[in-house]
Image (cartoon, rainbow, N blue to C red):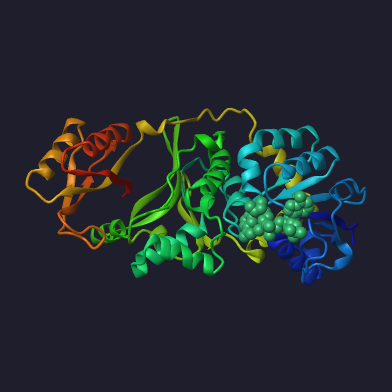
């Protein structure tokens, strides 16, 4: 058989442990698919004394430089996380003539241009299938399998923690804080869940998808994001009453030469395929001009699902495919698709608006007048009696609008917030129909 492909794993934690498990438990299967054996030469960690059931002790060290420099190593697999040292590991590896595989979405979203330019300069490739939606092969699908299409829309449930919380709230009516505590107890949420629930993690992944699908480089801090922290259970109840549920979506769609994108909780019809994605699962729905609508669903995290994607990238390198497709993809390089980002204020959408108002006559008319002044028409209204979250003389007023420009709608909401008899702030979400 051909010469082995040797790899260094930088990181032997959740994902690194999963990669070692697949490569070491199934060497014949991997060698057959790769056309040559794949050997783990080194595994670099912070604490060499930690027990690691899937990693042989003699492979473990703390010497990053040696793992990169080793002349027998062909591929460096970065699975340490973070954007500081990890960036240096990737750049040093490319400079040392190694190919790189990484699962690090934050690193690519923030430093993609520099990393991919270095890869092209050194004629090496960077595999990153695991960086978006864990075990779902969405990078390859967009970059290779759907290469004959112009992608026109992407909608993703890209954060399992948020989807777990929203599913628990929708199914069992529990509060946001109880659902988050449950997610933490079951290991679906970190002790500090901020990046998951504020939409940042999904924004990192969206930046990568938008790069592949539309050739647009969007600095991750320019992706408008709204998270689910503090989402009120009553809004899920009202959404259900109207035939919708609420999902945290990372969305990008083409309108002429512009790409609109955001991460936000969005009302989806309960019959929509994405609305059926429950618990910690991820899903991505893609629309291509030739293929139409397709949907991918599966585990977006976890040791083996994520390692499944990392190992696919390693096998692609062993076969020699990755080197060829990588150069053709021109990622994060200035090229000619010509799309640009649409400012969010100009995006048109339907909206769900819930305001708490004094229980007295004329409030609906006051709110409706402000919307009408901005040219926004109302599709339906629900006015409830007091709900358990707000007793006394305050009642929720729920309005669904027809299509309106986001900028106009937001300015209407800020005027509504200052109306006498309104308890601010009004809460609003866009509605995907
Ligand atoms: N976990 C998932 O389900 C998942 C899914 C998709 C993508 N990812 C991405 O995959 C990457 C790894 O995630 P993970 O969950 O496997 O993380 P993890 O369990 O925390 O593992 C990180 C590994 O890197 C090592 N490490 C960290 N800093 C180091 C340093 N300065 N020097 C040497 N080694 C260092 C750690 O060593 P010790 O073991 O000694 O601490 C550990 O082995 C991240 O970029 C993450 O975003 C993860």
Quarter of the image where one finds residue 378: top left
In this view, the residue farthest toward the left is 361
Residue 91 placed where, x, y %? 77, 39
Q: Work out whether 367 lies above or below 298.
A: above
Residue drawn at (44%, 50%) of the image:
249
- State left or right for residue 102 relative to residue 340: right
Residue 241 shows in this picture: yes
Image location (x, y in percent) of residue 375 = 20, 32
Tell me the residue at 16%/40% (across/down): 367
* Residue 50 in the figure: left or right of residue 203: right
> What residue lies at 53% left-to-right and 40% top-to-bottom?
210
432 shown above or below 58 = above
* Outermost residue to the right: 71
Q: In the depicted view, which residue is nearer to us: 138 or 179?
A: 179
Can see residue 158? no
The quarter of the picture where the N terminus appears is bottom right
Q: Measuring from the top left, give residue 49's x and y in whole percent.
A: 82, 65
Is 162 in front, or is 348?
A: 162
Classify residue 267 as left or right of residue 304.
left
Q: Quadrant of ligand 1?
A: bottom right
Classify 38 as above or below 326: below
Tally the marks.
0
Q: Nearer the viewer, residue 192 or 240?
A: 192
Check the image and report above or below for 428 versus 115: below
Task: Give the percent coordinates (x, y) of residue 275.
Answer: 38, 60
* Image position of 401 (left or right of 10): left
Quarter of the figure with residue 372: top left
């Amino acid at each position: 058989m051909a010469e082995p492909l040797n790899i260094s794993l930088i990181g032997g934690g959740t994902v690194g442990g999963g990669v070692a498990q697949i490569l070491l438990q199934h060497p014949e299967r991997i060698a057959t698919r790769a056309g040559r054996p794949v050997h783990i030469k080194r595994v670099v960690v912070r604490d060499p004394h930690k027990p690691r059931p899937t990693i042989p002790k003699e492979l473990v060290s703390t010497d990053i430089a040696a793992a990169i420099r080793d002349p027998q190593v062909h591929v460096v697999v970065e699975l340490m996380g973070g954007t500081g040292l990890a960036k240096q590991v990737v750049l040093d590896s490319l400079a040392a003539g190694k190919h790189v595989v990484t699962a690090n979405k934050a690193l690519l979203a923030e430093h993609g241009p520099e990393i991919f330019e270095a890869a092209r300069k050194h004629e090496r490739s960077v595999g990153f299938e695991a960086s978006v939606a864990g075990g779902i092969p969405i990078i390859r699908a967009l970059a290779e399998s759907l290469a004959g299409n112009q992608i026109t829309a992407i909608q993703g449930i890209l954060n399992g923690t948020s989807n777990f919380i929203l599913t628990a709230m929708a199914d069992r009516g529990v509060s946001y804080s109880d659902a988050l505590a449950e997610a933490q107890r079951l290991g679906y949420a970190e002790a500090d869940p901020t990046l998951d629930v504020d939409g940042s993690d999904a924004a990192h992944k969206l930046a990568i998808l938008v790069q592949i699908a539309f050739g647009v480089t969007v600095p991750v801090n320019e992706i408008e994001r709204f998270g689910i922290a503090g989402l009120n259970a009553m809004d899920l109840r009202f959404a259900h009453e109207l035939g919708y549920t609420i999902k945290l979506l990372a969305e990008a769609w083409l309108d002429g030469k512009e790409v609109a994108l955001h991460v936000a909780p969005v009302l989806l019809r309960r019959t929509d395929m994405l609305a059926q994605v429950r618990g910690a699962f991820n899903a991505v729905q893609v629309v291509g001009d030739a293929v139409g609508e397709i949907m991918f669903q599966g585990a977006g995290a976890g040791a083996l699902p994520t390692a499944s994607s990392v190992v696919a990238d390693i096998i692609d390198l062993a076969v020699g495919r990755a080197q060829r497709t990588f150069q053709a993809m021109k990622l994060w390089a200035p090229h000619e698709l010509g799309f640009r980002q649409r400012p969010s204020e100009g995006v048109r959408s339907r909206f769900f608006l819930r305001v708490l108002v004094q229980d007295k006559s004329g409030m609906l008319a006051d709110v409706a007048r402000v919307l009408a002044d901005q040219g926004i028409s109302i599709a339906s209204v629900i006015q409830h009696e007091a709900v358990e979250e707000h007793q006394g003389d305050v009642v929720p007023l729920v309005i669904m609008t027809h299509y309106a420009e986001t900028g106009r709608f937001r300015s209407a909401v800020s005027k509504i917030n200052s109306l006498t008899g309104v308890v601010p702030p009004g809460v609003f979400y866009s509605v995907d129909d």
